[in-house]
Image: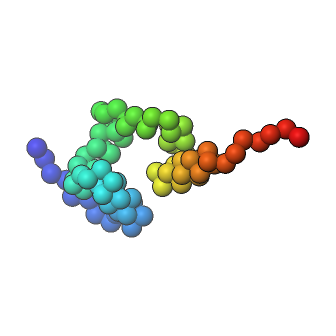
Amino acid sequence: MPDFLLKDIDSSIADRVKRLARERDWPINDVFLHLIKQALGMENPDPPMPGDIARLAGTWEDDESKALAEAMNALKGLPDDQPY
């Protein structure tokens, strides 16, 4: 297989790739291969997490989705509103 060398990667892209590698416990090379295959239409995108509509739409980061889920769980402990 041929090898490619990427140069001058923007620091925000590098940080995001490193974060994906940590989250998925993948080598950085595997993250790049996965992203390239997705961009070229050679691999299906990751399915959304069950019950995570924000991730389905692709508008929230994982930490934002987790924060919302924690907030929703905290609200479940509140008593139901009773009409006066």
Q: Return the residue nearer the eye: 17 or 9.
A: 17
> Where residue 47 sits in the image (x, y, percent)?
40, 34
Question: What residue do we see at 24% from left, 56% from top?
Answer: 28
Question: What residue do we see at 23% from left, 49% from top?
Answer: 30
Query: Is 9 located above or below residue 37 in the figure?
Result: below
Query: Is 83 located above or below residue 31 in the figure?
Result: above
> Where residue 43 sits in the image (x, y, percent)?
31, 33
Q: Return the residue nearer the eye: 72 or 17.
A: 72
Give the quadrant of residue 34. top left
Please count the marks in the image.
0
> Where residue 7 sits in the image (x, y, percent)?
28, 63
Question: What residue do we see at 32% from left, 45% from top?
Answer: 35
Give the quadrant of residue 67. bottom right
Image color mode: rainbow
Q: Which residue lies furthest to the left in this view?
A: 1
Residue 16 appears in the picture as rendered: yes
Q: Residue furthest right?
A: 84
Q: Return the residue nearer the eye: 39 or 45.
A: 45
Question: What residue do we see at 50% from left, 39% from top?
Answer: 52
Horizontal side of 15 relative to 21 (left or right) equals: right
Give the quadrant of residue 45. top left
Residue 10 appears in the picture as rendered: no
Location of the C terminus by quadrant is top right
Location of the N terminus by quadrant is top left
Q: Return the residue nearer the eye: 52 or 58.
A: 52
Horizontal side of 73 relative to 21 (left or right) equals: right
